[in-house]
Amino acid sequence: MNIVSLLIGGNMGDRMANLAAARNSINIECGHIISASSIYETEAWGYKEQNAFLNQALVIETHLEADALMDAILKIELALGRKREIPLGPRIIDIDIIYYNDEIINSSTLTIPHPSMAQRKFVLMPLTEIAPDYTHPILLKTNDVLLKECGDSSVVYKKSSE
């Protein structure tokens, strides 16, 4: 069994319903959700001229290997209406693999741990809520330490407990 940390988010349409649909699809297609953070509202990162995002960290158990998991995630995003038009732009749903066990994966299609996660407060806040002591396999720092050291000044706040 593989233990995987995911971040789900989106800023279009009914954001709460889209997160719920993503959680449901992940449970069916990818693996059992064993932990879910609160939902956080986050100002747009990178491309600022868009609505605020809702984000949530999940930890799942899955039998899927990393590449198969990524394929399943892309199919979920597509089924929920995800269109990739503007890099870092608005989206109905986004599902990122943050950690896959404690593996380091660098392939043409997948980089794990997520390469930008340590610079993004909208990833670290929900992730630290559910896995504060997990150690990043490259940086060798816990999520809690990464959050404390994060230089991202974006506004991120807890919207609700899920």
Image (cartoon, rainbow, N blue to C red):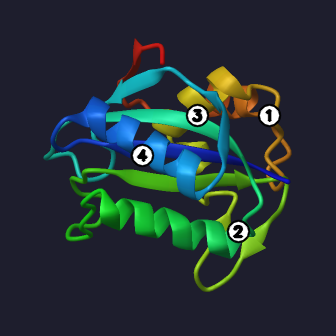
- The mark nearer the N terminus, 2 or 1, is 2
Q: Give the SS element for disc 4.
A: helix
Mark 3 against mark 2, which lies toward the viewer? Answer: 2
In the picture of the structure, the residue carrying the numbered disc 1 is: 142
Badge 3 crowding class, 10 Å Cα cut-off, few under 14, some 14 to 19, many 20 or more, is: many
Residue 44 image-quadrant placement: top left
Q: Is residue 127 above or below residue 106?
A: above
Residue 146 image-quadrant placement: top right
Compute the Cα span from label 3 to label 2.
Answer: 21 Å
Mark 4 against mark 2, which lies toward the viewer? Answer: 4
Compute the Cα span from label 4 to label 1.
Answer: 27 Å
- Number of marks in the rendered image: 4
Q: Is 70 situated left or right of 21 in this image? A: right
- The mark nearer the N terminus, 1 or 3, is 3
In the picture of the structure, the residue carrying the numbered disc 3 is: 124
- The mark nearer the N terminus, 4 or 3, is 4
Q: Give the SS element for disc 3.
A: helix
Residue at the spot 33% in from the left edge and 67% down from the top edge: 78
In the picture of the structure, the residue carrying the numbered disc 4 is: 22
Badge 2 crowding class, 10 Å Cα cut-off, few under 14, some 14 to 19, many 20 or more, is: many
Compute the Cα span from label 1 to label 3.
Answer: 10 Å
In the picture of the structure, the residue carrying the numbered disc 2 is: 66
Residue at the spot 80% in from the left edge and 65% down from the top edge: 104
Residue 66 image-quadrant placement: bottom right
Picture coordinates of residue 1, whole percent (x, y): 85, 54
Mark 4 against mark 3, which lies toward the viewer? Answer: 4
